[in-house]
Image: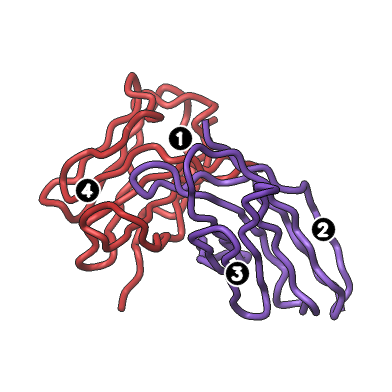
Chain colours: A red, B purple
C-alpha cells in the first residue's frame, strides 16, 4: 500500500512570495491533516479535513494560509505572502476513521520550506 | 490548553545502554498517548500507544506506561542499538483525533 505522498520535498522562496504544497493521502483515508514543524519543535496542527469538510482550522493563520481538499482526496496548502517565520517542514498525514475518532495517523515525508 | 513536555536532548548513549526519555502531559479529559519516531531522512512513524490509564504500549523493545497519577508516559528500552538513533516525539490526542506533540528528543547511540 502506497504511503502519504507530498510534493515538493524542498522549496526555497523569498519573503512575500507565494508557495503551494500538495498532499495525496493513503487511498480510502477520510481524514487529512496538515502540520507545521518548526526546527527544534514538535509538529503543530494547522488544519484537519474530514472528507472535503474542515474539522479544525483554529491554528491556521488565515490571513496568509489557505488549504483545500477538493473531492475529499488530494489537498493543497498555500501560503501567500510568505514570511520568514514560515520556514518549517510542512507535514501531511491521513487516517482512515471516517468519524474522526481515535485512529493512527500516517505521515508523509514532508516539504521543507525555507523563506529568505 | 493541552500540552506535552519531554526531556531535552540530545541524549547520547553507548550501544546496549538503558534508555529513558521522560514525557509528562497536561490535558483535560482522558487523552490517548503516543510515542512517534523520526529516523534520519524519514517521516514520522508511530512507535507505540496507550489509550487508557495503566495501559502499557510496546513495540521493537520500547515500552511506555500510561500513568494518570503522575500524568506521565516515559519511554524506555532495556538495550539500545545504533539503529535506534532518531528523534522521539511524545504526543497526546486533543479533540477530533488531532495530535499535540512535545518538542522531541534526539537520541544518538554510539557503538
Residue drawn at 55 percent across, 68 percent down: B48
Q: Are marks 4 and 1 on the same chain?
A: yes
Q: Dividing the picture into quarters, in which one does residue A30 lie?
A: bottom left
Residue positioned most to the left: A71
State the CA–CA distance, disc 1 to disc 3: 45 Å
The residue that label 3 is drawn on is B56
The residue that label 4 is drawn on is A50
Q: Are marks 2 and 3 on the same chain?
A: yes
Residue drawn at 31 percent across, 54 percent down: A101
Marks 4, 1: nearer the viewer: 4
Q: Earlier in the sequence, mark 4 or mark 1?
A: 1
| Secondary structure under the numbered disc 2 in the rendered image | strand
The residue that label 2 is drawn on is B11
CB atoms of marks 2 and 3 within 8 Å: no
Q: Is residue B59 visible?
A: yes
Q: Are marks 2 and 4 on the same chain?
A: no
Amino acid at each position: 500500500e502506497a504511503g502519504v505522498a507530498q510534493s515538493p520535498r524542498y522549496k526555497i522562496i523569498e519573503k512575500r512570495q507565494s508557495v503551494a504544497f500538495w498532499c495525496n493521502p493513503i487511498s480510502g483515508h477520510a481524514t487529512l491533516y496538515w502540520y507545521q514543524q518548526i526546527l527544534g519543535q514538535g509538529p503543530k496542527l494547522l488544519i484537519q479535513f474530514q472528507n472535503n469538510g474542515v474539522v479544525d482550522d483554529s491554528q491556521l493563520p488565515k490571513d496568509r494560509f489557505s488549504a483545500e481538499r477538493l473531492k475529499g482526496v488530494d489537498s493543497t496548502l498555500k501560503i501567500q505572502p510568505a514570511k520568514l517565520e514560515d520556514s518549517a517542514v510542512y507535514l501531511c498525514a491521513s487516517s482512515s476513521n471516517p468519524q474522526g475518532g481515535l485512529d493512527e495517523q500516517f505521515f508523509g515525508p514532508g516539504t521543507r520550506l525555507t523563506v529568505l | 490548553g493541552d500540552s506535552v513536555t519531554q526531556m531535552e536532548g540530545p541524549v547520547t548513549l553507548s550501544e546496549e545502554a538503558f534508555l529513558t526519555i521522560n514525557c509528562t502531559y497536561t490535558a483535560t479529559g482522558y487523552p490517548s498517548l503516543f510515542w512517534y519516531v523520526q529516523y534520519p531522512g524519514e517521516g514520522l512513524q508511530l512507535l507505540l500507544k496507550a489509550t487508557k490509564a495503566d495501559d502499557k504500549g510496546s513495540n521493537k523493545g520500547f515500552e511506555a506506561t500510561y500513568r494518570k497519577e503522575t500524568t506521565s508516559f516515559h519511554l524506555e528500552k532495556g538495550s539500545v542499538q545504533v539503529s535506534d538513533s532518531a528523534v522521539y516525539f511524545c504526543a497526546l490526542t486533543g479533540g477530533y483525533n488531532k495530535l499535540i506533540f512535545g518538542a522531541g528528543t534526539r537520541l544518538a547511540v554510539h557503538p
